[in-house]
Image (cartoon, rainbow, N blue to C red):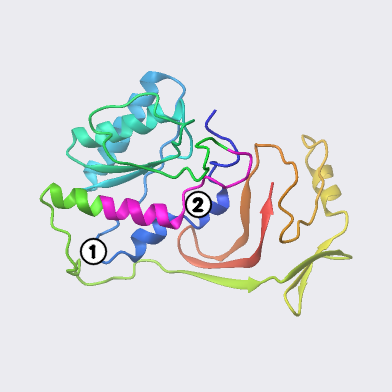
């Protein structure tokens, strides 16, 4: 429950996180950072982690928060616990979750008073289409607008004033290589015209190197080939590698126009 293909936020989604993108461009809000909180199985752990998230937010002197989750059912217990603990510390929040008719909150509290539902299905139920009910740019824009409104109601001014002198602490440069076609060939390479060639039988070397892998199949899915069966435990990931520097800085090479589906 709560991790179906239509609502699951993949690696590619987080690589292009809409909330991060919108907040990074926002001139009227200072964006201090992101806190990642896992989903616990035990109720006491859910409360414990929610308290720690709120403690970190309070230590960062956070005025308000956006709480996003990519699940429902049991996951919503963690979701509402975080919102409650933030509220107890005077930090108003806006929630982002799949709800619809199928994912209605299994529990709530007085602090859960503003949730953006990113269900996109007309039926209100989760579908088998990958990414159909994902968090999008428009959902992020709505959340930021609602967050500003909450700040104003709390008496915290939202203005266009500069937050002091701009400083570049770290810089990340992404160098993109546009891929226009993918094919199999004798060796893996990128050639003129943006053609990515994948070596035939490349999966065999991977299977040999890892005894836990029973079998691998590599297929090329062309644009428009959407209607075929996949298992629900999948992921989409960008093809990127760090060339220089550490996380959040340096230089990263990225292949655009192509992605990996697992």
Task: Judge whether residue 32 can be spotted in this image.
Answer: no
Q: Identify the residue at image location x=39%, y=26%.
A: 77
Circle number at residue 225:
none
* Left or right of residue 217: residue 124: left
**Are discs 2 and 1 less than 8 Å apart at CB?**
no
Residue occupying the far left of the picture: 155
Residue occupying the far front of the picture: 122
Picture quadrant of residue 4: top right
Front residue (pair 103, 85): 103
- Which residue position holds label 2? 14
- When the figure is inspected, residue 87 is found, relative to residue 130, above or below; the finding is above
Q: Identify the residue at image location x=35%, y=66%.
A: 25
* Left or right of residue 53: residue 245: right
Q: Identify the residue at image location x=63%, y=39%.
A: 128
* Left or right of residue 219: residue 58: left
Q: Is residue 128 magenta?
A: yes
- Which residue position holds label 1? 28
Picture quadrant of residue 85: top left
Q: Secondary structure under badge 1? A: loop
Front residue (pair 47, 157): 157
**Magenta span covers which residues?**
127-146
Residue occupying the far bottom of the picture: 192
* Quadrant showing the N terminus: top right
Q: Identify the residue at image location x=73%, y=48%.
A: 227
Instruction: Answer few, some or many: residues within 10 Å of disc 1's Cα (few below 14, many 20 plus, some between 14 and 19).
Output: some
Residue 92: x and y in percent read 22, 42
Mark 2 vs 1, N-terminal side: 2
Task: Judge whether residue 82 can be spotted in this image.
Answer: yes
Q: Secondary structure under badge 2? A: helix
């Amino acid at each position: 429950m709560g991790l179906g293909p239509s609502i699951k936020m993949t690696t590619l989604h987080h690589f292009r996180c809409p909330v991060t993108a919108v907040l990074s461009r926002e001139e009227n809000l200072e964006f201090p950072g992101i806190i990642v909180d896992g989903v616990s199985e035990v109720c006491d752990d859910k409360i414990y982690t929610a308290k720690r998230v709120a403690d970190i937010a309070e230590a960062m002197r956070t005025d308000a928060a956006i709480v996003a989750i990519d699940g429902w059912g049991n996951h919503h217990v963690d979701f509402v616990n975080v919102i409650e603990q933030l509220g107890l510390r005077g930090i108003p929040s806006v929630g982002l979750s799949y709800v619809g008719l199928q994912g209605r909150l299994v529990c709530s509290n007085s602090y859960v008073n503003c949730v953006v539902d990113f269900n996109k299905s007309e039926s209100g139920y989760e579908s088998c289409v990958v990414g159909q009910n994902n968090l999008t740019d428009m959902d992020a824009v709505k959340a930021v607008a609602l967050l500003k409104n909450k700040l104003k109601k709390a008496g915290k001014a939202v203005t266009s004033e500069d937050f002091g002198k701009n400083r570049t602490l770290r810089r990340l440069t992404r160098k993109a290589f546009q891929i226009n076609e993918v094919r199999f060939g004798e060796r893996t390479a990128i050639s003129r015209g943006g053609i990515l060639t994948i070596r035939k039988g490349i999966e065999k070397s991977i299977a040999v190197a890892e005894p836990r892998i029973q079998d691998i199949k590599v297929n090329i899915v062309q644009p428009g080939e959407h209607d075929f069966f996949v298992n629900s435990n999948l992921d989409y990931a960008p093809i990127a590698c760090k060339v220089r520097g550490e996380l959040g800085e340096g230089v990263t090479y990225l292949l655009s126009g192509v992605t990996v589906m697992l």
